[in-house]
Image (spheres, grey):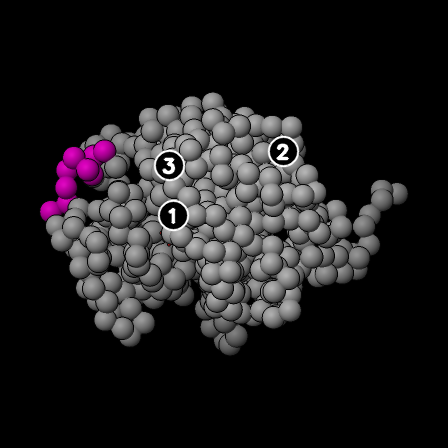
Amino acid sequence: MAHQEPYDNMTVQARYMPPCGRKEDEVPPPFILVIFGGAGDLGLRKLLPALYHLFIDERLPDTFCILGLGRREKTDVIFRKEVRAALKQFASTFYESSKAETFIRRLHYLSMDAGDANAYTELRSRIRDLNPAGCDNFLFYLSVPPHVLPAIVQNLHQAGLSRGEGARKIVVEKPFGRDRESARELNRMLLDAFDENQICRIDHYLGRETVQNILFFRFGNSIFEPLWNRRYVDHVQIMVSEELGIGTRADFYEQAGVVRDIVQNHALELLALVAMEPPVGFDPDLIRDEKVKVFRTLRILEPKEIDRWMVRGQYGPGVVRGEKVPGYRGEEGVDPGSNTPTFFAGRFMIDNWRWAGVPFYIRTGKRMSRRQSEIYAEFRQPPLRLFGRTCDRIAPNGLVFGIQPDEEISLRLSVKTPGMGNIPRAVDMDFNYEETFSVKQDAPYERLLLDAIRGDLTLFARQDGVEAMWDVVDPVTRHWETHPARDFPNYPAGSWGPGAAEELLRNEGRVWRYSSEGVE
Ligand code: BG6
């Protein structure tokens, strides 16, 4: 008889297994992490709290240290004070004074101008001083604006810090470049200094539990994969909607806009996970090969098609969560006549055997009605309208991967409403991470930092994929930049975006799952 796992065991494992596997197998070797921009917004809000979580969860080795770099003059003591305050604010549920102090003692600071090649001599000697045990696993995390990146890479290279006896890794934040050409240039420079397997191109969406679960769900269950194609799926919606505006990031956002900030990376990465073929194994490159194939089969649009299938928007003043907020053009640091889009909706087609003819709609924006990221696959209607006399159209089956604020998977089914009539009704079968595993799993940086320290590249983008994503969005940004919108601002803050985005689907006989009319 074929060997079968006892079902009960599987249940127990699923319930108690820690999210990254068994801790003892996962603790990485000693390391020194150098964070360029370590005292900046990302460092204090995300990276250092994530490292602290890993520390209290005993996922870091006994020997490690973290060196924050920045232009501002400050001592270790002041840096530690800032981090202590940040941990209290951003890691509050885990904050425990004695453990926090042990962690904080591992933090150091060096003030330097990262663009100045001479400053790297001091960086080298500081790393040497911090490294009495002779640890040779160094990571350089570049949490800096894109324009500073090339100089840092060159300087690390010239200072002999990019390659060496031990492991050296560089972590680069998205967006990688601002179009295909600049991404290639950046990559050439990175590859002068580092080898491809030393480069971690981070996209924090890929560290999210539900995002990783897309592959587990698709390839770990036999009942959905046969339906996962053009014969059964009517269309897919990918939504990344934010309530926040651009905060203090006007400089960055004015240069980037929504397409470079979200579509080229987070949204297309999600699309690839939904659409990719099963990899032949779970090795990093086998998975990344399949994703790249999806990017390469995405249809590239001509300007006329862009006008038809893509919608741009920019928020005006409005109300979000009961508070009045300014429009994008009224944000500090933004050009009052800015043409930068803060909203995108578009239809993407994947020209391959599995997905031919199935639209993938992406919608994302700042200052939207609510913060909600999800993927929704809607299935086709049943072939016959057997309930035709009581209803024309039953609610289609739909599968939702909720990414945030709630991490959940939900399947919509039709059942009969109790009673005498034949009235179908949609019901949801829900799986919620927090309820099932008793943990809130919104910890993408924890997972990605740990993977970077260990050198596991599965969840990082690869250069060919990055370039293929630029190939898809470059025509859109080019067209929009050469043909400024005449109707900006075209949606009030706190709404679901411009009316044209709703029409985009309505014209095809579909609706967004979330719209001004509510949730589907
Ligand atoms: C970042 C973008 O990559 O993702 C931001 O640069 C955006 O503009 C953020 O706000 C959204 O991330 P999250 O984790 O809040 O969905």
Question: In front: 360, or 241?
Answer: 241
Location of residue 515 (image quadrant): bottom left
Q: Secondary structure at mark 3?
A: loop
Q: Secondary structure at mark 2?
A: strand
Q: Tag 3: Cα neighbours inside 10 Å, few (<14), some, or many (≥20)?
A: some
Report if residue 484 lies within the magenta region. yes
> Which segment is the magenta one?
478-486
- Amino acid beneath label 3: Gly
| Earlier residue among tags 3 and 2 | 3
Q: Decide: is 240 above or below 196.
A: below
- Determine which residue is flagged by label 2: 167
Report whether the residue tagged 2 is closer than 8 Å to ligand 1: no
Between 417 and 430, the one nearer to me in the picture:
430
Q: Amino acid at mark 2?
A: Ala
Disc ID at residue 71: 1
Residue 378 appears in the picture as rendered = no
Which mark's residue is nearer the viewer, 3 or 2? 3
> Which numbered mark, 1 or 2, is in the foreground of this view?
1
Residue 503 in the image, given as x and y percentages of width and height: 24, 52
Which label number is shown at residue 278? Answer: none
Give the distance between the C-alpha atoms of the residues marked 3 and 2, in whole angstroms.
24 Å
**Residue 420 vs residue 307, the one in the foreground:** 307
Q: Position of residue 310 (x, y in %)?
A: 26, 42
Report the Cα–Cα distance between label 1 and label 2. 27 Å
Residue at left 28%, top 74%?
A: 322
The 10 Å Cα crowd at callout 1, few under 14, some 14 to 19, many 20 or more, is: few
Q: Would residue 121 be seen by someone viewing this image from the given angle?
A: yes
**Residue beneath the point at 47% across and 56% down:** 75
Q: Quadrant of the N terminus?
A: top right
Query: Label 3 belongs to which residue?
Result: 115
As for residue 300 lying within the magenta part, the answer is: no
